[in-house]
Image: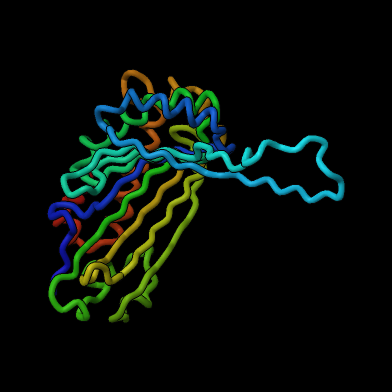
Amino acid sequence: MTVAPIAGRHAIKTVSFGLEWQEPLSEDLLVLLKALHVRVRDKLPRVIEHQEIGLKIVVSPAAPASPAPENASLKPRLAGLNFEALQPDGEPAWALAIQRDFLAVSCHVYSRWDLIWPQARDLLAPFIPVLARECGIAVIGLQYVDQFRVIGQDEQFKAEDLFRKDSRYLPKHVFGLDDLWHSHHGFFQTMEEPTAHRQLNNIDVDVINAHQERLVQITTAHRALLDQPATDGAALLNDQGDGELHQHLDGLHRLNKTLLRELLTDSMCEQINLRET
């Protein structure tokens, strides 16, 4: 029995870059963001619109003064957007999702941070000035999904085959288990740089059966909850590429590597090139 990272030299299935705001987007603002698709169309050609139908039910003993037009409340409204680029097998390679309270860019073909982050930044760039001005960015987030395959006799897998026994991010109980298990852990930190925020970190480990094989999936989600919403798009994303958004996400990326080094065995850290730098 061996444990192997899903992508050979790394284990990253998906990485997502997220922005959140406090008030839901209006339909008019969603339409404006949809119009910006032209700026990323060469990289994300596929467009999927999400519609919603709102029902208004009025309970009143009095008849309405003037009846509403028939089916007026059933008119579909734009509720979200997905812009995608597909892999040859039809699965997404890159995707940008806009919902009423968040925007996320997801990469499903990860190679290395220095190559992926500039591409994600270019996809975010057209939307940030509008969202910062109209909504104020309240949360900046980074999420990784890492997967490891258990090859051979999967019932022989033990937590110590992949994880440090002294890791503070796993309960000792899991090291005595020989079946499926999960561990979900999270904590806050107060940070002052690059801008004042509270940082929420979640480390979720799931040992699962999927597609007739046993997988170990690690989802690490990092969210910077800004003390003051960011309303200056130029400060978030400047021409030099080192604005506040880059500083936050680069810091969260480095934190992610640190957490994984404390979670995984030395041999696996070496296998996936998880160096100290």
Q: Residue 170 in the image: x percent, y percent? A: 37, 67
Q: Residue at x 40, y 36 (%)?
A: 248
Q: Which sits in the foreground, 196 or 205?
A: 205
Name which quarter of the figure residue 241 lies in: top left
Q: Residue 264 in the image: x percent, y percent? A: 25, 61
Q: Which quadrant would the C terminus be assigned to in this image?
A: top left
Query: Is 45 rendered above or below residue 272?
Result: above
Q: Which sits in the foreground, 18 or 113?
A: 18
Is there any visible trace of residue 198 in the rendered image?
A: yes
Counting labels gives 0
Q: Residue at x 17, y 67 (%)?
A: 3
Q: Which quadrant would the N terminus be assigned to in this image?
A: bottom left
Q: Which sits in the foreground, 207 or 87?
A: 87
Query: Is 36 rendered above or below residue 169?
Result: above
Q: Is residue 174 shown left or right of residue 156?
A: right
Query: Is 165 rendered above or below residue 122?
Result: below
Q: Residue 219 in the image: x percent, y percent? A: 35, 57
Q: Is residue 65 shown left or right of residue 116?
A: right
Q: Residue at x 20, y 51 (%)?
A: 274
Is there any visible trace of residue 139 in the rendered image?
A: no
Query: Is 15 rendered above or below residue 231?
Result: below
Q: Residue 52 in the image: x percent, y percent? A: 52, 44
Q: Residue at x 71, y 37 (%)?
A: 68
Q: Which sits in the foreground, 196 or 211?
A: 211
